[in-house]
Image (cartoon, grey):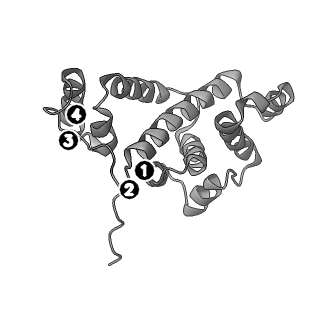
Amino acid sequence: MVRLRPLDPEQAPSAAGALLTEIIDRHGDAGGMARTMAHSPAVLRGYLELSRAMKRVAVPRPLSEKISLAVQEWIGCAYCLAAHAAAGRSVGLSETDIELARQVTATDAREAALIAYAVRVLAEPSAITDADIAQLRAYGWSDRLLADVVGLVALNQLTGSFNLVAGLEPAPAAPAA
């Protein structure tokens, strides 16, 4: 059930309204999450800036989507899971890849270790040890990439938590033809 209602640009505080108008002009629609975030210009701007920054991470996009799926499964945001499953399919993930990511694993041991690290960053960052980081480095993951994963987790924490509090849910699936 929707708890916070999405806003149109003219209903939003002026700074958020301008951001929504910009998004709509570029993409044709701002989407339910951004329109709902518009209640808080600071949250909307922060989300947009972090989202843009995370597009420049060293994590390959398919792997980034696997990380997002694992993190959102842990958070429990159906809205985000639907969005990341669709995004994952658009970058070549199979249904098996998507299901494994939601189970915090992958067919590739190297990727599975990074996905598990991402969920630990979310759930228990104080428990990550020097040995854990050394193991990730042994798999070939760079310090930059390990730092980028923290940013991806933070972005997913923001969106998942926001959507759950706002009561946003994915659109019902269209019936099969």
Q: Earlier in the sequence, mark 4 or mark 2?
A: 4
Q: Residue furthest bottom?
A: 177
Image point (79%, 28%), residue name? 133
Measured as percent of width and height from the top left, residue 33 is found at 34, 41
Q: How far, Cα to Cα, is label 4 from label 1?
A: 19 Å
Q: Earlier in the sequence, mark 2 or mark 1?
A: 1
In the structure shown, which secondary structural element does the residue marked by tag 2 occupy? loop
Residue 170 has which mark? 2
In the structure shown, which secondary structural element does the residue marked by tag 4 occupy? helix
Q: Which residue lies furthest to the front in this view?
A: 3
Mark 2 and 1 residues: CB-CB less than 8 Å, in contact?
Answer: yes
Q: Name the residue beneath numbered marker 3.
A: 28
The image shows residue 10, relative to residue 87, as above or below, that is above
The image shows residue 143, relative to residue 1, as above or below, that is above
Q: Which mark is in front, 4 or 1?
A: 1
Mark 3 and 4 residues: CB-CB less than 8 Å, in contact?
Answer: no
Mark 4 and 1 residues: CB-CB less than 8 Å, in contact?
Answer: no
Q: Residue furthest right?
A: 131
Which amino acid lies under the numbered mark 1 shown in the image of this protein? Ala
Which amino acid lies under the numbered mark 2 shown in the image of this protein? Pro
Which amino acid lies under the numbered mark 3 shown in the image of this protein? Gly
Image point (66%, 41%), residue name? 119
Q: Residue furthest left?
A: 10
Residue 83 has which mark? 1
Res. 174 image quadrant = bottom left
Side of 35 relative to 61 (left or right): left
In the structure shown, which secondary structural element does the residue marked by tag 1 occupy? helix
Classify the position of the N terminus by image quarter.
bottom left
Q: How crowded is mark 4: few (under 14 residues within 10 Å), some or many (20 or more)?
A: few
Q: Name the residue beneath numbered marker 4.
A: 26
Res. 96 image quadrant = bottom right
